[in-house]
Amino acid sequence: MQQLIVQLKEKIVDTLYLEDIAPEDIDENAPLVGSDLGIDSIDILELVMMVEQDYGVVIDNKEVGEKVFASVAALAAYIKENRPRASKIS
């Protein structure tokens, strides 16, 4: 799970072009939206597309999205739980 969290932090920085933030600067338990990262609803849409493309996990409604993007740890747990069987991380 920790490996997935590290990977997600890197993908968040890359996907959103967060130039002044290093992956290790992101607190895995801090809120993603409304935090020092400056992530807004447009950024969340980009992250949804990244999660669907890279992990095969669909986030198809706002209620799920709010829970999933509560933090990097919540996102990692959702991906781990909902990944297609062939690509699950142990």
Image (tube, rainbow, N blue to C red):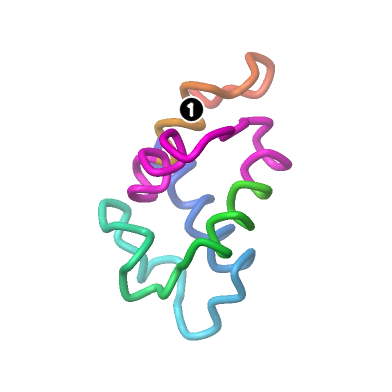
Q: Residue at x 54, y 68 (%)?
A: 13
Q: Position of residue 25 (x, y in %)?
A: 35, 71
Q: Position of residue 75 (x, y in %)?
A: 43, 41
Left/right of residue 60 with respect to residue 39 in the rendered view: right
Left/right of residue 53 with respect to residue 24 in the rendered view: right
Whether the magenta-drawn stretch holds residue 71 is answered as: yes
Q: Which residue extends farthest front?
A: 62
Give the main secondary structure, helix, strand or loop, of the magenta stretch: helix
Q: Which residue extends farthest top?
A: 85
Check the image and report above or below for 81 versus 12. Answer: above
Q: Which residue extends farthest right?
A: 53
Name which quarter of the figure residue 87 lies in.
top right
Q: Residue at x 47, y 40 (%)?
A: 62
Q: Residue at x 64, y 64 (%)?
A: 15
User: Which residue was labeled with disc 1?
Assistant: 80
Q: Position of residue 6 (x, y in %)?
A: 46, 52
Write down the region rendered in magenta: 51-74
Check the image and report above or below for 30 versus 18. Answer: above
Q: Position of residue 57 (x, y in %)?
A: 62, 30
Q: Which amino acid lies under the numbered mark 1 shown in the image of this protein?
A: Lys
Q: Which residue extends farthest left?
A: 29
Q: Quadrant of the N terminus?
A: top left
- Tell me if mark 1 has few (under 14), some (14-19) or many (20+) residues whose alpha carbon lies within 10 angstroms of its own: some
Front residue of this view, candidates 51 and 88: 51
